[in-house]
Image (tube, rainbow, N blue to C red):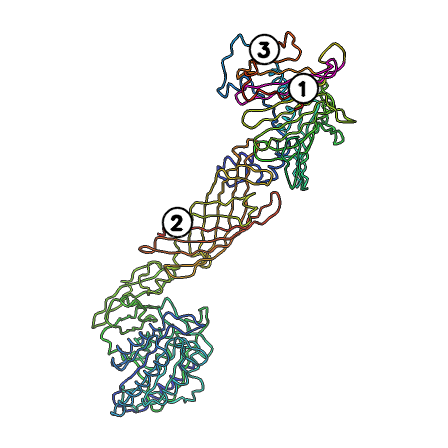
Amino acid sequence: MKVRTIFGVVLALSAAAPASAAPVRRFALLLGNNRGGPETEPLRYAEADAKKVQAVLRELGGYQGQDVVLLAGAPADEALTALTALEARVAAAKAAGARTSLLIYYSGHAKVGDLLMGPSRLDMGLVREHLKRSAADIKIGIIDACESGALTRAKGGRRGPSFLYDTDDREATQGLILISSSSENESSQESDELGGSFFTHYLTSGLRGDADDSGDSRVTLGEVYEYTYHKTVAVTASTRSGVQHPTYSYDLAGQGDIVLTDLSKGQAGLLFGPELEGRYLVFDLGREQVAAEISKAAGEARSIALPAGEYAVKKRMQDHLRMVRLSLGEHGAVPVLESRMERVAFEDDYAKGPILRAELERRRRRLSLEAQVVYQGFLSGAARRELFPALPLFGATGRIGPMLGGAYLSLDLLFGSRRGLVLDLGALALSQDFFETQVAGSLMWRFGGSIVQFGVGPRLAALYMRRSFPFDPDLKTQDMLGLSPAGATELMFFVGPGGHVVLSAFGRAGLLLYSVDDNRALAYAEGGLTVGYRP
Amino acid sequence: MKWKLACVALAVPLAACNAPFSNDEILFLKAAPRGLRIEVPDEQGVQHQGLRVAQSDERTPARFYQDTLRSAQEANDGILSLLDMVDALVVLEPSVREDDKRVWGPLPASEAAELALVVTRVRTATVVQFTSTSTPAEADQYFEFYMAARPPGTGDDAWVVLFGGTSLPQTSNRQGTGVLAVDFDNFRRFDPTIDAAGLVYVAYDTRFEQTAIDLAIDVVRQGPFMAKAAWAYRDDGEGGGRFVYYLIEDLVPTTPAEEILGIAARWLPTGRGRADVVVTEGDVPTFYLASECWNDAFERVYLASSIPTPDFTPSGEVSACGPDLLSPQFPDD
């Protein structure tokens, strides 16, 4: 509401103010860095977000190719060097008489006022100072990072009239505006479904047309900020990390709003007619990423500008998706028709980004069946001599997962036997045949990639042991059934085409509770190999 | 039975259906001696080895061999067969399972008696040597056992011990060493037809694939150790053996005085053997000595007698005994 009020005032003022402006030359430095150095988990989409912004600025924002500098994964000193060089070019353009704008966009980690760029840090205050000192007429800083509200705090700007650039005859607007994706103590979140951060996703969707509330085919800073703010707050309210509030500050002079994208510059696009209602995701099949999102009510038409390519539009229903494939040429708007959308099951969603696809693949419950060979030995020499001899076991292992909190459930069925062993009871020595059956279940949590994974987890085995004395007719066959808790580790390899062949080496340590002659917890160890197939 | 049926029906090895997985179960089961036998070769036994030599009608059966065989059979069928009572009990599940004790029974054995076998473990390090020729054995525990009987339906106070002793089980197939005493006076309380009396002591050692059995018969209960008869049996584990027995009895009816008879018999795996006999005391003022050799068909091939009689007329040459059996070994040797 606050945002709407402020920008509403700005727009109201701008409507009454005359302005005249020369054509603007626009410069942008776009920074994306997935890595934030020690103590941070790598991001998945920060660098992709910067590329999305680059695309929309070039296609719809009037930015010339050479004036947009994109640095993906660059350290702080490289970013500062690029900024300094870009400022020089801004100053040169300004000296040549052009009106100029400079936009700095950053997507990545941030903490305690610093942008974390790999192992290096860049002070947000320094970025702000660079923007303030820049010769550009319009300076925009957008930080999509955790705790990025540090950029906008203590700004001291005023609530002045909005500004426009070369859009009408009102007085050209000048000054600085800073936007952050979250407040000072909030996290900025990514979405696997969207293939990017929530904030940048809505920023670019809005710039592509979904924020064009006025329907004038131009998306202003006020429109896109308000759109991005509300979408981000609404969507992140239900996430595990909590709601995320974008913030802004400004120091502007002049009148008119700042137009960031002109949809008429896009030569192709999708047209969502009045009959459509709801939230639609537009997926760029060629780039394997979400290109835009449209949320609309029935009765209004909405268009978004997109480059030529293959797209899928999908709408999430309660228990399925509705999807349609569309091909965009170089020119013209293609309508999205409800009647052409088909029902698609969630698992058959063909519009997923590679990371999400990999993640879903990782989460996909899979069954494997493996042959197993294992050698079992009790740690106590007395236990081996008098009760349970060392034994090779053979059998099968079935695994299914992930399930139960990401764990894999394994079931082992093993058999082993040895003949002619000596049962050494000190004064009494006997020849025995020994047999063991083991039925075990384990829950293994796995870590690692798609080829090599390390697993660890608990195991519970039921052990049936039987010994007979073929050369001693006086003695009956003896047997016991015991429960054995154990811990297990495994190193798994998924090899071959599609990773269908499973190889693993494992080790286990367990206790067998023996309570016949006396009560003892006998420790044993097992090691072995498996080889099998995973469909 | 239902449990057993369930095991069979399931046909999976997931239920413990057999005896407990217990070393103690084995040790206690092995504690009481079983299957002791004096194995003197006979015609059938040697035939089984394929060594039988055709017997000619002109030959004379070896008299002392037959005495030896008969004495061994009497020991097997008499005293040692009593140990078969152990077999009858230990096929049952123990009625008492304690850390150091097992009890099998009571088992109704006849209208006159029910039986119980009690085995206790003594956790004391010891060195045992039960027969005169046993290799001493070190053990950190040994077992005591006794077979008891009582009239059916009576209380615990009615139990009397039929036989009991001490043992050290070792290796498989009923091997071990131990000593036991059989109380025939107590046996007669349940079976008056038994004509034996007093105590019989049996020491045995069946370790190392060899067998040594010493028996002392009709031992006087009090006073110095006296026996009316004694056996000592040794086999070499390869078919050869030695059997010595003494008998105190009125063998020469001239006067009621008792003579002492001693026979020392030894044989080779083929069955060929030699017996050396001594009779003294009573109506034999000096020694009567005799030696007999027999061939693989248990026919006399040599006889020497210090007092020739119609039954014991010297015959043959000592060389017919064969090189291993040329020298006499009288019981006192």
Q: Nearer the viewer, mark 3 or mark 1?
A: 3
What residue is shown with label 3?
Answer: B315
Residue A294 position within the rendered picture, expressed as x and y whole percent measured from the top left: 33, 71
- The residues bearing labels 2 and 1 have C-alpha atoms spaced at a distance of 78 Å
Instruction: Give the overall secondary structure of the magenta segment.
Output: strand
Q: Which residues make up the magenta segment?
A: B257-286
Asked if residue A442 is positioned above or below residue B250 in the image, the reply reads below
Front-lying residue, B284 or B215: B284
In percent of the image, x 55 and y 22: which residue is there?
B324
Q: Are marks 2 and 1 on the same chain?
A: no
The numbered disc on residue B262 is 1
Dot 3 falls on a residue whose secondary structure is loop
Residue B32 position within the rendered picture, expressed as x and y whole percent measured from the top left: 64, 32
Dot 1 falls on a residue whose secondary structure is strand
Front-lying residue, B183 or A98: B183
Residue A185 position within the rendered picture, expressed as x and y whole percent measured from the top left: 47, 77
Sort mark 1 into few (<14), some (14-19) or many (20+) by Cα contacts within 10 Å. Answer: many
Quadrant in which the N terminus of chain A is drawn = bottom left
Asked if residue B262 is among those painted magenta in the image, a careful observer would answer: yes
Whether pointer 2 and pointer 1 mark residues with C-beta atoms closer than 8 Å, the reply is no
Q: Quadrant of residue B125?
A: top right
What residue is shown with label 2?
Answer: A369
Sort mark 2 into few (<14), some (14-19) or many (20+) by Cα contacts within 10 Å. Answer: many
In percent of the image, x 68 and y 20: which residue is there?
B246
The three-letter code of the residue at mark 3 reads: Ser
